[in-house]
Image: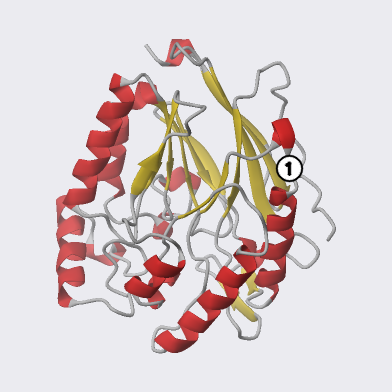
Amino acid sequence: MNETRPSARVRTAADMASTLRIGLFADVQYADKPDNPWRDEFGRARLSFFRGALSNLGDALSQLASHSGPGALAFTIQLGDIVDGYKDDAARGEQDLATVVAELRKYPLPRLFHVIGNHCRYVPLPVLKRELGLEKGTYYSFTPEQHIEWRFIVLDASEVYPGAIDATSEDETQFQAACERCQVPQIQRDARNGAVTKQQLEWLESEMCVAQKRNQTVLLFGHFPLYEHASCTSHLLMNASEVLAIMDRFEPHVLAYFCGHDHVGGYAVRNNVHHITLQGMLEAPVGTNAYAIASLHRTADVLDSAAIDLRGFGTVPSRVLTKKRSELV
């Protein structure tokens, strides 16, 4: 398999000592169906390569798994919508998921973590949790044993999703309640975008308290963008303002939020936190791909400065994202 050429670097972080490296990709959206040309809300011509996405996934996994020794990845995370799914055919969605999981198992990645996306929810949730190893919970956190200065928090932004194939009336009730709390206008309440429950918000706050107590730097992962300047507005989490409010309270400890959903991708800084929307693998033009390797840097014992050296492949641009002491006080 040929390695996709990395995107041109914005600037380097060669003078920093690397602590750990992680792999990222988003929106594979594999489906056993023909490619789909379409136009988005801005009139742009788009093309979804449903079957070709599986080949892109294999190429990306092969490259990510090839890193060994000091350059080995600590883990890889997929940011949601690993399958496209079918709104009225759970069996076909399960079959596509089985195909993707079989592809994932071909490659010896050290650890692979999953984010649930809205298209994932076209597969019944119990099946999704079993196949992706999420039986213990769809939102969670972890800290690598050798890198206790970091805390990684994974959100389930599709926890409340009225469009899920197994949705109940409670999903719609909670979705509307979240929109009411955040004063989202009726015209902007897009059922393609999920919401998180109050319970998950309380859990997130408790995780941030732990990070603060332990002097950890936090990276968050979710499927839906939270910030309109890092994505088009129509793709935002419905109660993004509630998540952002928690991030704001613990801003000195939060370095970045990674997500997918908007396949075009995007990037912006809000309140000293980097928001990165990863380009979708599904729409990577033939002969290219869309994934990244992030090298994370931080002083181990002091919350001094932190940085991410993001090396993009294919349609994902490379960036160096920093947060200095002057921004932490």
Residue 156 screen position, x and y as percent = 34, 55
* Amino acid at the residue labelled 1: His
Q: In this rendered view, identify the residue nearer to me: 2 or 7.
A: 2
Residue 170 screen position, x and y as percent = 15, 71
Vertical position of residue 156 compared to residue 165: above or below: above
Q: In this rendered view, identify the residue nearer to me: 94 or 79.
A: 94
Residue beneath label 1, please? 67
Residue 220 screen position, x and y as percent = 42, 40
Residue 12 screen position, x and y as percent = 72, 25
Image point (44%, 88%), residue name? 91
**Crowding near pointer 1: few (<14 within 10 Å), some, many (20+)?**
few
Helix, strand or loop for disc 1:
loop
> Where is residue 137, by image quadrant?
bottom left
Image point (40%, 83%), residue name? 87
Is residue 324 visible to us here?
yes
State left or right for residue 255 relative to residue 29: left
